[in-house]
Image: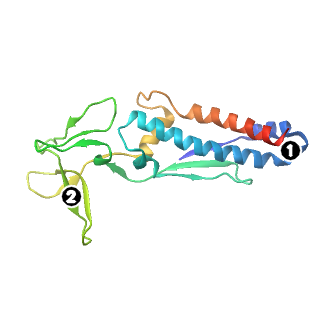
Amino acid sequence: MIRVSVDRHSLRQVQKRLGKMEKKAPAVISAALNDTARTGRVMLTNEARTRYVVKSGASKKNMTIKRATYSSLQAIITAQGKTIGLSKFKATAPYSGAKGQVLKSSGLKALVNGQGNKAFAAGVTTGHPGVVHSGIFQRKGKNRYPIKELQGPSSAKMIEVVYEGKRNVRKAVKPEIEKTLKKNIDRQIRRWVK
């Protein structure tokens, strides 16, 4: 969960800059916060795609925005959901065994567990008539069953890594979102004070 908010000092500065229209400060700030949250979601998705080999829909669909209001001057970007199946990243499944790639900095790697079981692509019935789930699977032991679907990181984990700038990320998104908020506040003030 990423909070985009302003402190009391910033609120007083906006009120001062608005002059006689200081009562419009909550409207100005909430509009700036909502613009920043929408832009921030795009920035986070784009930065995640520079680090991870993931389809944009897989990471973006799990992100929601709780908009700022006049009484609650904070916007919240929430990324949640389960881990994403390896098939949503980069994976190939030749007969010799599946290979997968999650990070752009690494190449395709053979997916073999400690017991020597190679991964494979398959469609698995879900228990509902006519519904099949496709993915990259691997046997847990020497027996045919049970099998497990191989997973990559969740949207929340990918967004956390790029927001904070962890694990050798090219650049953290947090300072960019803060700069965008300042620009949006200035733009909203210019809209009201002419």
Classify 10 Å Cα crowding around label 2: few (below 14), some (14-19), many (20 and above): few
Nearer the N terminus, badge 1 or badge 2?
1
Residue shown at 82% from the left, 48% from the top: 24
The C terminus sits in image quarter: top right
Badge 2 is on which residue? Answer: 123
x then y, percent, for residue 147: 18, 55
Q: Which mark is residue 22?
A: 1
Q: Secondary structure at mark 2?
A: strand
Tag 1: residue type?
Answer: Glu
80 to 13, vertically: above or below: below
Residue type at the position of mark 2: Gly
Q: Residue at x 79, y 37 (%)?
A: 190
Residue 62 lies left or right of residue 37; in this view the side is left
- Disc 1, SS: helix
Is 156 rendered above or below residue 194? Answer: below
Mark 1 or 2, which is nearer the eye?
A: 2
Which sits in the foreground, 116 or 20?
Answer: 20
Is 63 on the left or on the right of 101, as rendered?
right
